[in-house]
Amino acid sequence: MGWVLEIVRGVRLTTYITVLLSIALMSTLLVVNVSVLNALYRLYDEIAFPRSGEGLNVIVVAGYSIAPFTSIIDARTVEKRLSCVEGVERVIYEVLSMVNVNGLSMVVRGLSKEDLKLLTNYSVVKGEDLSDDCMYCVWIGAELADRLGLDVGGYIVVYSLFTSSPYVLQVRGMLDIDAPYAYELIVPIDLARAIRGIGNSYASIAVVFLSLGTDRSTVLRCFNISGEEIGLFERALIALKYIGREDRPSVYRSAAELYMARLGLHRDVFLAVTISIVVLTTVGCYIVGNMAVVINRNNLYILHMVGLPRHRIRMVLALLILIIAVFLLPIVVYLSEYLLHIVGLKVLGYPLIRGVDVSMSLLTLLFAYIFTALGIFAVDIVGEG
């Protein structure tokens, strides 16, 4: 195995450092981009779907608008549609509204105490539990309360984007609650309707809980969704666009795809950006692999002249980089989380990124390494002329 050590000595230390730094930086760039894209398209699903909905048969009904917080649905219409479905266990109505608080844009969510307990797990850190009867009261997550400088008994002025009058609300409780509720102002549903400027029979979304044996397609058909469109559903969001008395349904793979399209930010735009970064990463790693051989060509050529085959030299070089690249994973994860923390991307107070997927980082790192290895094998150790 002495020939392996000779190959290791034949490559400059700066080459290893340059190659590994290049792989780490390009992998980090790709991880950051994919993380942002994934978080952006998961955001609206997180807002609309219950946190405790894992394993449940749930369908969310929303209006055809740019976001859940501008959606309006008529509960009477929803109930009428659902009357043809057997197996509807419960329907929860929520009102979401965009507001301005101390110059910050955030979301007010209105629902009943019983419904909040069903949708998510929470505990009262300080003050009182949510009450349906307290008209001008608000409950807030402990982290958000600290960020806004609020405490139980304090007051907060909420400026609705849909009504002309501001609302002065008293903080009645601080909650230890899961996202996305941790970044919202929780109020009774009647107060949320007043802030949103809608009547008592209206809501933003309806969360429909079905018995486990109920086929979702029966619900979709009650909303005039054709059989061909049913296959598009992943989490079964129904969008209704009211034109006169006619319901014209549109089906989307996820809530985000619907809302982003309405904003003019189609999925293809984000995919094009991701593909561009993937191409740049691919070409960059390939060139780095080329350079790893070209810079050390003289030393590697000498090893070839004393009897070592070209493919063996390149294979050992690629394996050495692979062994060291595996230990880059913590660095890539750390750099990605650090960059995302610095950027601090938020949408209406919701942090887009709350952590980097380690498995995705590993796959990205291996992707970058593969093209670096291809670059190594693409260059001949024996130079031209």
Image (spheres, rainbow, N blue to C red):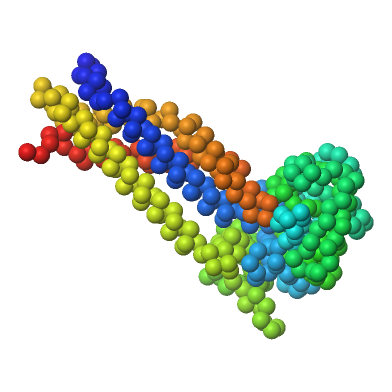
- Image position, residue 292 (x, y; %): 26, 34
- Image position, residue 72 (x, y; %): 73, 69
**Left or right, 319 with reference to 229:** left
Residue 113 in sight in this render: no
In which quarter of the view is residue 227 placed? bottom right
Residue drawn at x 61%, y 43% is 354
Give the residue at the far right of this rendering.
133
In which quarter of the view is residue 234 placed? bottom right
**Left or right, 284 with reference to 172:** left
- Image position, residue 239 (x, y; %): 64, 69
Residue drawn at x 45%, y 44% is 29
In which quarter of the view is residue 194 placed? bottom right
Q: Is residue 36 above or below residue 17?
A: below
Is residue 42 or residue 191 the one in the foreground? 191
**Left or right, 309 with reference to 65:** left
Give the residue at the far front of this rendering.
103
Residue drawn at x 58%, y 41% is 341
Is residue 16 or residue 101 the one in the foreground? 101
Quadrant occupied by the C terminus: top left
Residue drawn at x 10%, y 39% is 384
- Image position, residue 167 (x, y; %): 85, 61
Quadrant occupied by the N terminus: top left
Give the residue at the far bottom of this rendering.
244
